[in-house]
């Protein structure tokens, strides 16, 4: 079974703090993704990565950055957290092979910025 | 623009059948995914359709009509554990997923 883990289930931070969210997958997947999920909205893609040290902007990259130094690990960084970044953050990975490229999700991190 | 529409909420009775509809507009199309998400948990993969027609997987079936930009998820013999949100996502020409907001399904005894 694919396993995607995230460093924290719940996180509370203050405005202006730098926040690191870590994601690790154990299936040697090429692709990794960071989404945020807010009530009434679909999953919105923040950043994704197709390979080590490679990153691509998604639909809402502003205020975020990412790092992929190892294949299994993809980090999301909030340089200076703001209250509008309070959300559920979901990490996903996929094999990157073929069009039926199912994404597998981690349990999510619910971030509250005060 | 790219868009996915699905109902916000549906209610059904235990043991019954429910159909959750999804319409999509994307730049190119490389398939339609359905995921299940229980409250506070991660989305889990249910089905993938890229060709027209019905795919059956146990109590769950998924249908696709590419010409109509339409899909549905059919759940039979509903159980209380099926209470969850069901997310529809279409894959565009860049192999990116465009997500609907999800349909919250409430099952009543």
Image: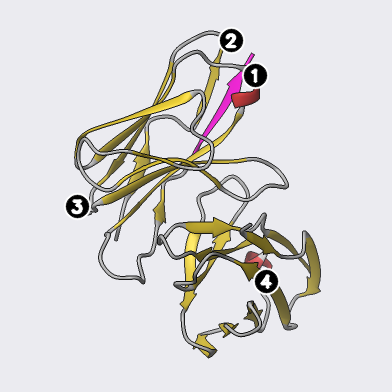
Label 2 with label 4: CB-CB less than 8 Å: no
Q: Where is residue A75 in the image (x, y as percent from the top left)?
A: 34, 31
Q: Position of residue A60 (x, y in %)?
A: 53, 36
- Label 2 resides on the chain identified as A
Label 1 with label 2: CB-CB less than 8 Å: yes
Instruction: Specify few, some or many for label 3: CA neighbours under 10 Å numbering under 14, 14-19, or 20 or more.
Output: few
Which residue is drawn at the image coordinates 62% and 26% (left, top)?
A86
Please name whichever residue, A14 or B15, is drawn nearer the observer in this view of the structure. A14
Q: Name the residue under label 4.
A: B22
**Helix, strand, or loop for circle 3?**
loop
Range of the magenta residues? Answer: A108-114
- Label 3 resides on the chain identified as A
Please tell me the numbered disc located at residue A83: 1
> What's the CA distance linking mark 1 and mark 2?
7 Å
> What's the CA distance linking mark 1 and mark 3?
35 Å
**Helix, strand, or loop for circle 2?**
loop
Say whether mark 2 and mark 1 are on the same chain: yes
- Label 1 resides on the chain identified as A
- Asked where in the image residue A81 lies, by quadrant, the reply is top right
> What's the CA distance linking mark 2 and mark 3?
35 Å
Please tell me the numbered disc located at residue A28: 3
> What's the CA distance linking mark 2 and mark 4?
38 Å
Q: How is the image coloured?
A: secondary structure
Which numbered disc, 3 or 4, marks the residue closer to the eye? 4
Label 3 with label 4: CB-CB less than 8 Å: no
Question: Overall secondary structure of the magenta stretch?
Answer: strand
Which residue is drawn at the image coordinates 44% and 13% (left, top)?
A18
Q: Position of residue A67 (x, y in %)?
A: 29, 29
Please tell me the numbered disc located at residue A15: 2
Of label 2 and label 3, which has the lower sequence position? Answer: 2
């Amino acid at each position: 079974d694919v396993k995607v883990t995230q460093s924290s289930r719940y996180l509370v931070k203050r405005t202006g703090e730098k926040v690191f969210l870590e994601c690790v997958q154990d299936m040697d997947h090429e692709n990794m993704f960071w989404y945020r999920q807010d009530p009434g909205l679909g999953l919105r893609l923040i950043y994704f990565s197709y390979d080590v040290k490679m990153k691509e902007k998604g639909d809402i990259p502003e205020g975020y950055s990412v790092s992929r130094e190892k294949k299994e690990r993809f980090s999301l960084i909030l340089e200076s957290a703001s209250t509008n970044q309070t959300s559920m953050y979901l990490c996903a990975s996929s094999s990157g092979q073929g069009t039926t490229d199912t994404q597998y999700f981690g349990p999510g991190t619910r971030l509250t910025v005060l | 623009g790219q868009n996915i529409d699905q109902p916000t909420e549906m209610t059904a009775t235990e043991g019954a059948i429910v159909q959750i509809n999804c319409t999509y507009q994307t730049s190119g199309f490389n398939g339609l995914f359905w995921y299940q998400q229980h409250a506070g948990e991660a989305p889990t993969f249910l089905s993938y359709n890229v060709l027209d027609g019905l795919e059956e997987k146990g109590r769950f079936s998924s249908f696709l009509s590419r010409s109509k930009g339409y899909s549905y998820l059919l759940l039979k013999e509903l159980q209380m554990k099926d209470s969850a949100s069901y997310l529809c996502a279409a894959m565009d020409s860049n192999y990116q997923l465009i997500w609907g907001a999800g349909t919250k399904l409430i099952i009543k005894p």
